[in-house]
Image: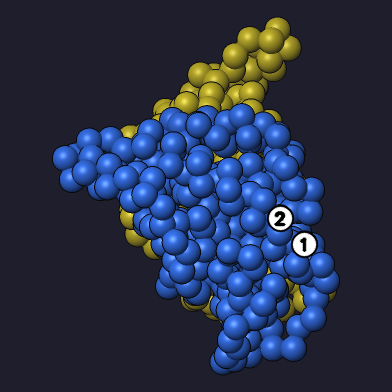
Chain colours: A blue, B yellow
Amino acid sequence: MRFTSETAADGVSERSFSLGDVTGVFWSPVGAVGGPLVLLAHGGGQHKKAPGLVARAHHFVRACGFSVVAIDAPGHGDRPRTEQDERARALIRQRMAAGEPVFDEIARDNASRAAQAVPEWQGVLDALPGFGPVGFWGVSMGSAIGIPLAAAEPRIAAAVFGLAGDLLVEAARGVRIPIEFLLQWNDELIPRETGLTLFEAFASEEKSLHANPGRHADVPHFELESAGRFFSRHLR
Amino acid sequence: MRFTSETAADGVSERSFSLGDVTGVFWSPVGAVGGPLVLLAHGGGQHKKAPGLVARAHHFVRACGFSVVAIDAPGHGDRPRTEQDERARALIRQRMAAGEPVFDEIARDNASRAAQAVPEWQGVLDALPGFGPVGFWGVSMGSAIGIPLAAAEPRIAAAVFGLAGDLLVEAARGVRIPIEFLLQWNDELIPRETGLTLFEAFASEEKSLHANPGRHADVPHFELESAGRFFSRHLR
């Protein structure tokens, strides 16, 4: 993990890094050398420093005292896009513009990125051996990556998932850690029933579905605080 | 409101009272003369000082600084039972023992108690004019009473409901305040679909469904803390 820049404000240190081909950012309480770590995965079309991610990272650092790491997903942010990335994106945009459902296209695109992203996240954990226990926060494409990651990776102790459907059911059956699962009641991308089916599939003894009115991007702000308390309960 | 006894421990004052035919208990921070008030309604077969209610009241007083009031529902606790109460209970017990569904019987019994309990709760609010804003916490029979109460009573600003089904849909359509709604994923008394239908019916702009695995009585402890934070957000 090669750190390329560091800034600090309001008690939060922010360091950009690269790890092989992967670009990322690491937030922590200034001076932290260990303690709980939250992996923060962005949604499709976003990147490691999208405003929602930065706000979430700052909340976890300042309200919970955690360290937080985000990486650009394959084909996102500072990472190169392949021709296949561009084709998949163009197809999704085209179908959305035509008012056609894009659920299957997005799920297929997410699955191919997840296959690449799971070992990348494991590499990030290998590069931060002094930190833990480890939580994972990621919804939408972040869950498409995080659910198979949590099924494969015993270092992850608790996770917030959501805004995802039943194509992840098989992976979810392998997840046994405590989860909080976000569902948007009027999600225009994920049919409600498929979200409920995915929640049902997790093998976790503790799993809590939080459903709120609104569309895919309308997760209410209070769910951020709820996630912070959920992680505080399980990572402390 | 005639106070009949007072004790105090750990900073929590507990006063029993009667108000006409209604028996109740009032918890508050020692010395409180106003501030947010939570109405606490018990479930069927319980009473105003059932262990779960006392624990909940202490949490709201100590962690949130609220005052809390609970009353015995009609035919419960220190209040007389009518012959009709006894008949309804016997029927429910008999059907449960035979492994038969009791959803309709419980709903009918709850509806008749709610018709009596709604004006009783309004009387309690009249008797505590110095307190507010007001929240309501009640699941199962507590929601059968609380949902029509919240629809009728503008003094209630936020509510936690749950463990209830679609026979309350009409009342829920009249509820516009923020709610947190508890659903037990494996509830043996309330079919899951009817709980989801009830959640859907609330007219509230902010409503948050919290679904957890387990049976009717297995609501996890962390939902108590969640309710405290929900009320803190809306009653402060």
- Does residue B123 appear left or right of residue A9 in this picture? left
Q: Quarter of the image containing the N terminus of chain B?
A: bottom right
Q: CA distance from mark 2 to mark 1?
A: 6 Å
**Circle 2 chain:** A
Front one among A99 and B94:
A99
Count neighbours of disc 1 (C-alpha within 10 A) and say few if under 14, some if 14 to 19, many if 20 or more: few
At 57% across and 31% down in the image, what residue appears? A169
- Does residue B112 appear left or right of residue A97 in this picture? right
Which quadrant holds residue A204? top right
Looking at the image, can residue B218 be seen? no
- State the residue lying farthest toward the front: A83
Which quadrant holds residue A32? bottom right
Q: Which residue is mark 1?
A: A126
Give coordinates of residue B59: x percent, y percent.
71, 64
Identify the amino acid type marked 2.
Gln
Q: Which residue is mark 2?
A: A122
At 53% across and 24% down in the image, what residue appears? B191
Give coordinates of residue A188: x percent, y percent.
31, 43
Kind of element beneath mark 2: helix
Front one among A128 and B133:
A128
Give coordinates of residue A232: x percent, y percent.
72, 65
- State the residue lying farthest toward the left: A98
Identify the amino acid type marked 1.
Asp
